Image (cartoon, helix red, strand yellow):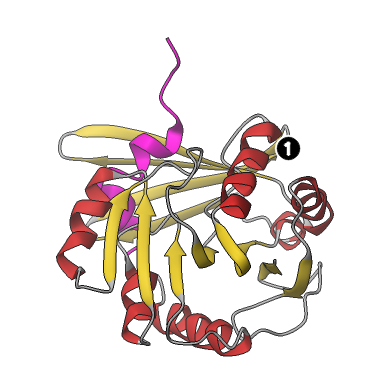
Amino acid sequence: MKTKDWFTDWFNTPYYHTLYKERNDDEAQLFMKNITSFLNLPKSTHILDLPCGKGRHSVFLNSLGYKVTGGDLAANSIKSAKKFENHTLKFKVHDMREPFNNKYDAIFNLFTSFGYFEDDKEDILILQNIKNGLNKDGFFVFDFLNAEKVKLNLVTKETKTVDAITFNIKREIKDGFILKHISFFTDGKNHCYTEKVKYLDLEKMTSFFKKVGFTITKVFGNYNLDNFDSKTSDRLIIIAK
């Protein structure tokens, strides 16, 4: 029997949302404003936010006037996001490895939500699904960590206390993956999860994009849309068509 993927379990726990609850909404909103403005997206644009988590990017994009669909594998997150639905904002459970039934004008893959799989073929399949899910002149926005900077500045150990839970975090780069081991004690027991994201730098992502027929039109290094620098940029943001 195939073991469950790490993200299926971890993203569905309340602890995942506790650990990351201080994620900066201002920063996320600034990025959404900057990118929609840079792409000059008309208000009639239908955007797919995939995976959407609890929908924070989707809700904000919708408030800017866009029609938005959010898809995510974590049923708990979708249940939570559904309370924000309106006639131009919908959420559904969707696995990125499955093709889409609809076509979209833009697809956003945000906040390092890629590179979860051992086999490159699975990552390439996801990109193929995204390519097939775009309308003819549609844009793909890919927002990932900058692997090279992570490697240069790896914080191997860290402790973070949120809502009276102390999270012990250990990071390592091993076998082509950036690993983040998270352990904590709460509700009477010890919990351990590992986040596992492939070490994907610009060169490797470029080769993935080429394989599915994407053309990269722009590469940015942060949410202010400054140029990408492999040593110093916080993010690897790729725009493709």
Residue displayed at 59% across by 35% down: 117
Range covered by the magenta-colored residues: 1-21
Amino acid identity at mark 1:
Gly
Give the quarter of the figure containing the N terminus: top left
Residue 12 at x, y percent in the picture: 29, 43
Residue displayed at 77% across by 66% down: 216
Where 142 sits versus 209, above or below?
below
Residue 118 at x, y percent in the picture: 63, 30
Report whether 48 appears left or right of 126: left
Say whether residue 116 is visible.
yes
Report whether 167 appears left or right of 150: left
Mark 1 surroundings: few (<14), some (14-19) or many (≥20) residues within 10 A: few
Residue displayed at 15% across by 39% down: 187
In depth, the one of 233 and 37 nearer the eye is: 37
Report whether 190 appears left or right of 195: left
Q: Does the magenta stretch include residue 104?
A: no
Residue displayed at 72% across by 50% down: 200
In depth, the one of 94 and 51 nearer the eye is: 94
Q: Name the residue under label 1.
A: 176
Residue furthest to the front: 136
Where 106 sits versus 30, above or below?
above
Where 122 sits versus 40, above or below?
above
Give the quarter of the figure containing the C terminus: bottom right
Where 203 sits versus 227, above or below?
above
Say whether residue 22 is visible.
no
